[in-house]
């Protein structure tokens, strides 16, 4: 079995521009989906904190 750590010292290879563009586009879409999920989801910690504060005030 070959030692995989031998490849660490080698210089990085250049990625084809079309592959790099596709990967960057996929990352941008994933970030957009994550931001939309946060926007339309409940922050359970905030809800619990708000409810407990309102109960203490009453």
Image (cartoon, grey):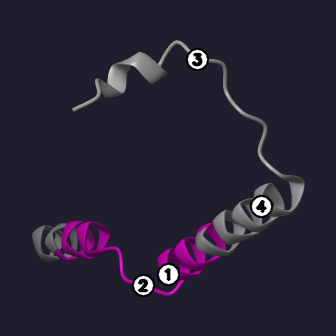
Q: Which corner quadrant holds the C terminus?
A: bottom left
> Depth-wise, is mark 3 or mark 4 nearer the camera?
3
Q: CA distance from mark 3 to mark 1?
A: 40 Å
Q: Are marks 3 and 4 in contact (CB under 8 Å)?
A: no
Residue 39 in picture, x, y percent from top left: 55, 79
Q: Residue under label 3, please give it.
A: 10
Left or right of 43 in this view: 56: left
The numbered mark at residue 27 is none
Q: Residue under label 2, please give it.
A: 41
Q: CA distance from mark 1 to mark 2?
A: 6 Å
> Depth-wise, is mark 3 or mark 2 nearer the camera?
3
The stretch of residues the image draws in magenta is: 31-51
Label 4, residues with CA under 10 Å away: few <14, some 14-19, many ≥20: few
Label 3, secondary structure: give it: loop
Quadrant in which residue 52 is drawn: bottom left
54 or 4: which is nearer to us?
4
Q: CA distance from mark 3 to mark 2?
A: 45 Å
Q: Residue under label 1, please give it.
A: 37
Residue 1 in picture, x, y percent from top left: 21, 32
Q: Is 32 a magenta residue?
A: yes
Precedes in sequence: disc 3 or disc 1:
3
User: In the rendered view, would you say 25 is above or below 41?
Assistant: above
> Depth-wise, is mark 1 or mark 2 nearer the camera?
1
Q: Are marks 1 and 2 in contact (CB under 8 Å)?
A: yes
Q: For the stretch drawn in magenta, what is the main secondary structure?
A: helix
Q: Residue under label 4, please give it.
A: 19
């Amino acid at each position: 079995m070959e030692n995989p750590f031998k490849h660490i010292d080698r210089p990085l290879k250049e990625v084809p521009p079309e592959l790099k563009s596709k990967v960057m586009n996929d990352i941008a879409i994933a970030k957009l989906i994550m931001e939309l999920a946060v926007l339309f989801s409940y922050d359970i910690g905030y809800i619990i904190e708000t409810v407990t504060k309102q109960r203490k005030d009453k």
